[in-house]
Image (cartoon, rainbow, N blue to C red):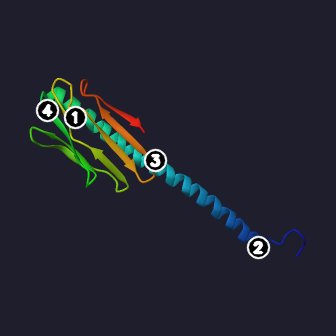
Amino acid sequence: MQAGNRGFTLLELIVVIFITGIAFSIVFLAVSREYEKAVFKDASKKIFITLKHARETSLMERTPVTFMLDKENRAFWLEKNGSKYGRTHQLPENIKISGESIMFFPKGNASGGAIIINDEKGRKHSIEVDPILGTPKIKGI
């Protein structure tokens, strides 16, 4: 064998595999954090959009619509004319929700209130519904 055609030693291969493993673990941690943030933002947006939909439905159909909340099961839905309207939305297990039901009236106003969403990482959003205008707004706390 000539010098320069030897290949890699076992030590060199172990070092390369070790460095590659560290790089993959750093990338994995970064991606998992971003995924958790995205899931939390998605949950907040679903609640926000459902509140907007409740207001719009109340205005268009000239009937009160209520945003209902089940804190224990982390679920929310709309009710119209005393019965469920649409589907029930379930939040992931790591996200907690608190607040009270909010009623939207045909003139565009609402009972008002705030829905608080938080997770175990300390992220927290408040979705507040203006009682006069009936419009929801997301606030990061």
Residue 23 lies, in percent from the top left, at 64, 58
Task: Identify residue type, mark 2.
Answer: Leu
Q: Which secondary structure lies at badge 2?
A: helix
Q: Mark 2 sits on what residue?
A: 11
Q: Earlier in the sequence, mark 3 or mark 2?
A: 2
Determine whether label 4 and label 2 are within 8 Å by CB.
no
Identified at 71% across, 65% down, the residue is 16
Give the crowd class for mark 3: few <14, some 14-19, many >=20 residues within 10 Å.
Answer: some
Q: Mark 1 sits on what residue?
A: 54
Q: Earlier in the sequence, mark 3 or mark 1?
A: 3
Q: What's the distance in space between the residues labelled 3 and 2, CA to CA?
A: 40 Å
Q: In the image, is 81 to the left or to the right of 66? A: left
Nearer the observer: mark 4 or 2; the answer is 4
Q: What's the distance in space between the residues labelled 3 and 4, CA to CA?
A: 34 Å
Q: Residue 64: which disc? A: 4
Position of residue 14 relative to residue 69, above or below, is below
Q: Which secondary structure lies at badge 3?
A: helix
